[in-house]
Structure formats: structure tokens, C-alpha cells
């Protein structure tokens, strides 16, 4: 296992492992029908209990263009399940919940610090030499990497929270193993897995129908 750790100063942000050829084939099957460049994948930050990648880590840059999605949710069952949560007004509900609870622990804006960790992670995924070259010769690109957090959004303390997409939030939660809206995400069943129903799809055996949620949490793995 080629495990890589990504730190922000003295704090561990997340870990990921590089994908072998078999893993990459699984991810390509999981992402079938969705626009995605597999060349951007650095590794997987989370596997389900059946061993399949469910969140992949992506390069912060596509050539010299910032790539906004650091963590991409690949689990087909979870992606499908979140669509139903979003269709029921989930994006607005999560934004409201985060606004209400972001200062629940005093004056500390929990969502800002979570978003800030995403920015640190993007910088840590690039070599010091590459960061130096960007800062000197592509200052606008460097600025976007420094300032844009989850999904390429920019959040400043005091501004309204915009989560953009629940898939992005779920992927970030599973990768970092923490999220300021973890309570809300769990209450909507987003931490559950397929219970093995989609395993054959991921391994390329059959194409099963997506069934109801199981009761096993991905976050327990």
C-alpha cells in the first residue's frame, strides 16, 4: 500500500493511497456516463467496506488550470442516493443548518476553518517547486488555489454559506473523516453504504438495480 499523508502545518488533514490498475478500472466503471478525466486522479482517500474506492483525490491543476474538485465521490450507490436528497431541497437545508450551527462552539466559524483546510490540502498536493513557479509566473492561478475552497467556491467569514453540491460535501466528509455538517449528513442517511448490492457493478460483474439504503455506515470503515 502506497499511503500518502497530507498535512496542513502540524495537523494531519487526510491520507490517500495510490490506485493500482485494478482500482482504476473500478473507478472508471463507477464513473461511466459522467464526464471525468482519470489522468487527474492521484489516489483514493476512502474505500467502502468491500474494498472499492468511493472517494478519489484529484490533482489541484489540470495543466495550468485550477481543477476545483479535490475530492470526487465515485461510489455509484451513494451518488444516486444523494441525488434524491438534493431533489428534496437538501442543498438549501444543509446551507441553513450550517449557518445555524457554525458558531455553536463559541465564536469559531467551523465552516470557514473546514473550507480553509481544503485550501491547505490543495497547496499541499503540489510540490514546493511547482508552487514557487506558479507564484512567480502564474500569480492568478496561484491566487485561485489559495483562495478557493470546496469545489472551487470562495467563502469568507460573515458571508452566506454556499455548499454548491451535496456530493462535494459528502466526498469531503468521507475524505477528511470530519465535517461541520456531519450531524445533518448522517441524519439524511448519507453515511450509509449499499450493503453489497452495488459491489458487482463496481467489479464489473453485473449491473444491479439500486435498492433502498442499508444501515451500515461508510464512516465506520
Image (cartoon, rainbow, N blue to C red):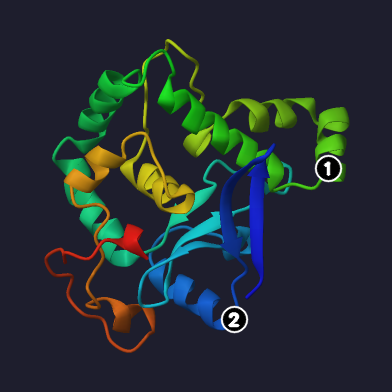
Residue 2, image quadrant:
bottom right
Q: Residue at x 17, y 50 (%)?
A: 84
The answer to whether residue 188 of the structure is visible from this angle is: yes
Residue 203 drawn at (x, y percent)? 39, 83
Residue 14 drawn at (x, y percent)? 56, 51
Classify mark 1: helix, strand or loop: helix
The answer to which of 16 and 135 lies nearer the viewer is: 16
Classify mark 2: helix, strand or loop: helix
Residue 172 drawn at (x, y percent)? 44, 46
Q: Residue at x 42, y 66 (%)?
A: 31
Disc on the earlier residue, 1 or 2: 2
- Which residue in the protein does label 1 denote? 128
Closer to viewer: mark 1 or mark 2:
1
Residue 11 drawn at (x, y percent)? 62, 40
**147 is higher (above) or lower (below) than 53:** above
Q: Is residue 105 left or right of residue 214?
A: right
Q: Residue at x 28, y 23 (%)?
A: 101
Separation of marks 1 and 2 at Cα, in angstroms:
28 Å
Q: Quadrant of the C terminus?
A: bottom left
Residue 106, image quadrant:
top left
- Which residue in the protein does label 2 denote? 21
Amino acid at each position: 500500500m502506497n499511503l500518502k499523508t497530507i498535512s496542513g502545518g502540524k495537523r494531519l488533514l487526510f491520507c490517500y493511497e495510490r490506485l493500482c490498475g485494478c482500482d482504476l478500472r473500478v473507478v472508471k466503471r463507477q464513473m461511466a456516463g459522467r464526464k471525468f478525466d482519470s489522468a487527474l486522479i492521484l489516489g483514493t482517500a476512502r474505500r467502502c467496506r468491500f474494498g472499492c474506492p468511493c472517494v478519489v483525490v484529484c490533482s489541484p491543476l489540470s495543466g495550468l488550470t485550477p481543477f476545483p474538485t479535490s475530492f470526487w465521490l465515485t461510489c455509484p450507490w451513494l451518488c444516486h442516493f444523494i441525488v434524491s436528497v438534493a431533489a428534496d431541497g437538501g442543498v438549501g437545508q444543509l446551507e441553513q443548518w450550517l449557518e445555524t450551527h457554525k458558531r455553536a462552539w463559541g465564536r469559531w466559524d467551523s465552516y470557514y476553518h473546514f473550507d480553509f483546510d481544503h485550501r491547505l490540502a490543495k497547496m499541499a498536493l503540489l510540490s514546493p517547486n511547482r508552487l514557487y513557479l506558479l507564484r512567480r509566473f502564474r500569480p492568478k492561478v496561484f491566487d485561485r488555489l489559495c483562495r478557493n475552497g470546496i469545489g472551487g467556491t470562495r467563502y469568507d467569514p460573515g458571508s452566506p454559506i454556499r455548499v454548491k453540491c451535496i456530493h462535494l460535501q459528502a466526498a469531503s466528509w468521507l475524505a477528511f473523516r470530519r465535517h461541520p455538517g456531519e450531524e445533518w449528513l448522517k441524519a439524511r442517511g448519507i453515511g450509509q453504504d449499499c450493503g453489497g448490492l452495488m459491489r458487482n457493478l463496481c467489479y464489473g460483474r453485473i449491473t444491479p438495480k439500486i435498492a433502498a439504503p442499508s444501515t451500515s455506515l461508510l464512516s465506520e470503515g
